[in-house]
Image: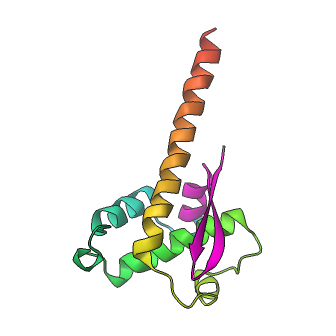
Amino acid sequence: MAVTKTIEIDGKPVEFRASAAIPRLYRNKFHRDIYKDLNQLQKGIDEANPQESDLDTFSLELFENIAWLMAKHKNPDIPDTPEEWLDAFNTFSIYEILPQIISLWGLNVETEVESKKNLMKLNAK
């Protein structure tokens, strides 16, 4: 079951979607593991003090790719590249958006775990 969330970016509401398809879509598009990348980003950001965060330009690109993919997963009308999509915004703060993307992904993982538990209970009956 997919989980969606609307996040305001540059004064515009943007819908994001997380589902079990995201890791595969990410791997196919960027040839990377989304779990490792999200973990790396989460370790590098200090939400309480952005100036103390340890994020390089590569981390910023990872974040932008993940955000674009989750937005594209919700709305197929979004441009076909992260660059085209990002061009629609004046500002795109990793410090404001990344924690919400991580939260959305966490909700998706919780939903998947709960669904598996329920399925196991049904199979046990």
Is 122 placed left or right of 109 in the picture?
right
- Which percent across, then down, holds residue 28? 58, 64
Q: Identify the residue at horizontal 40%, vertical 64% (top origin).
A: 37
Taking 123 as reference, is 74 above or below it?
Answer: below
Residue that protrudes farthest toward the right in the picture:
77
Which residue is pictured at 77% across the width and 74% down the height?
77
Does the magenta run of residues contain 10?
Answer: yes
Quarter of the view holding residue 102: bottom left
Residue 95's place in the image compared with 16, above or below, is below
Residue 106, image x and y in percent? 48, 49
Q: Considering the image in quadrants, where does the C terminus appear?
A: top right
Asked whether residue 30 is in view, the answer is: no
Instruction: Give the number of callouts.
Output: 0
Residue at the top extreme of this rendering:
125
Residue 76, percent across and down?
A: 75, 69
Q: Quadrant of residue 52?
A: bottom left
Give x and y (percent) for residue 55: 30, 77
x 60%, y 81%: residue: 11
The quarter of the rendered structure image containing the N terminus is top right
The residue under the point 33% across, 64% down is 40
Residue 38 in view (yes/no): yes
**Would you say 12 lies left or right of 37 here?**
right
Q: Which residues are magenta?
A: 1-27
Side of 63 where 88 appears, left or right: right
